[in-house]
Amino acid sequence: MDVPVSQRDRAGLEFLGTLQGHAGGILQPAAGARYAELVPEPPADLAARRRSVREAIGDHGPWLFDRLLTRYVAEEIYVRAIPAAERARAEIEAWLDVPADAPGSLTLDPDLVAPSYFGEGFHLTTGGWDGHDLMGVVIHDLGYRYVLMPGGVGAARAGESLTDHRTQVARQAPRRDYRRILEAGCGNGRFAEVVSAEYPGAQYVGVELSATQLQYARARCVHGGHDWELVQAAAEATGLPDASVDLVAIFTLFHEVPPKSAREVVEEMFRVLEPGGDLVIGDIAPAERNHAFRAVVLDWETEHRGEPFMRSYLQLDLPSLLTDAGFTGVEAYGLGKGDYPWIVRGHKERA
Ligand SMILES: C[S@@+](CC[C@H](N)C(=O)[O-])C[C@H]1O[C@@H](n2cnc3c(N)ncnc32)[C@H](O)[C@@H]1O
């Protein structure tokens, strides 16, 4: 939605975007260049890479300031965006309040017990994804729009649009004629928009744990004239019938779950896919596909930027999880700079 934001609130958020852009666009490349100069042949192992970066540039000003600003911005987004959203509460609530009988559906589960790791509070969001009732708008229309899109976030660099990455991922499905498409970890519906645009003849189903993200997705669905089915459930146990979808498309869920859950999610996706169906995953490339310095930058988020499973994800053998679950024709490849987005895809054979 277009949140009415005062000049002062907007300037405060844009300032954070500028800081993040300076960190990611100027300081971090300078630190990377210094590291490459000092360590022309970096180690392959992630822990050794971490040590190597610390030893080589641990006292390098641009590196220290890059990390300081990145952490500061990540925390400060919510300090600034939540009050800005509160000031626009009436308009935001009016936008979220869509008619119950509009096309599509939202099924919330008041008895849902989310997996314990979900309470960790991703991305340093104050109180987690559901720490504030307007968190959908706080994250998307304020944080992402004014700070993270212009400044860069995670594997996406300053100015790169995650929407473009989503479109690239959605296009990696091998067919165009899907009937029913499931997205696990659908957030506030940004990938759903892309899936609907790319596969206009298919019914979209989104599964997500966070109620605030789903409420945002529901409003996005109604205002956009879609008929999405949105369900509050864990990707590990969706509650959907066996063999009920013919494509599963997932964008940036796997780096947010622990390895045991990653395996369970892949198995669950295999269960709900009908024979002949496909799975397409878009996320961050594993450590060995990133340059040593870049891998350490991503790994740093584990302890310092609310990505508790980034380290394990970077070392996860996702293609093997697909093969173990029964998928065939498993492929893994990168699409853009630094192999981001990274694609892992597989097929469920007809019996
Ligand atoms: C980085 S966001 C991506 C959202 C969406 N796919 C998109 O492209 O905008 C990851 C989402 O996965 C959700 N999530 C994390 N763990 C989950 C789980 N076990 N089951 C369902 N959703 C989960 C989070 O709440 C979050 O909304």
Image (cartoon, grey):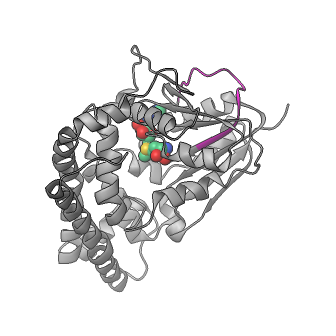
Residue drawn where x is 74% and y is 36% of the image: 179
Pick the residue in front: 160 or 225.
225
Residue drawn where x is 40% and y is 50% of the image: 310
Q: Total of numbered circles in the picture?
A: 0
Question: Which secondary structure class fits the magenta region best?
Answer: loop
Note whether 255 is above or below 164 in the view shown. Answer: above
Residue drawn where x is 52% and y is 38% of the image: 262
Pick the residue in front: 24 or 261.
24
Where residue 12 sits in the image (x, y, percent)? 16, 58
Where residue 315 sits in the image (x, y, percent)? 48, 53
Residue extending farthest to the top is 111
Pick the residue in front: 233 or 192.
192
In the rendered structure, does residue 245 fall within the stretch colored magenta? yes
Q: Which residues fall within the magenta stretch?
A: 236-249
Judged left or right of residue 302, residue 81 is left
Note whether residue 48 is visible: no
The C terminus lies in which quarter of the figure?
Answer: top right
Where residue 119 sits in the image (x, y, percent)? 31, 31
Judged left or right of residue 59, residue 191 is right
Judged left or right of residue 12, residue 241 is right
Residue drawn where x is 43% and y is 40% of the image: 188
Residue extending farthest to the bottom is 37
Where residue 44 sits in the image (x, y, percent)? 46, 67
The quarter holding residue 168 reads bottom right
The N terminus lies in which quarter of the figure?
Answer: top left
The quarter holding residue 226 reads top right
Note whether 123 is above or below 65 in the view shown. Answer: above
Note whether residue 181 is visible: yes
In the rendered structure, does residue 237 fall within the stretch colored magenta? yes
Ligand 1: image quarter? top left
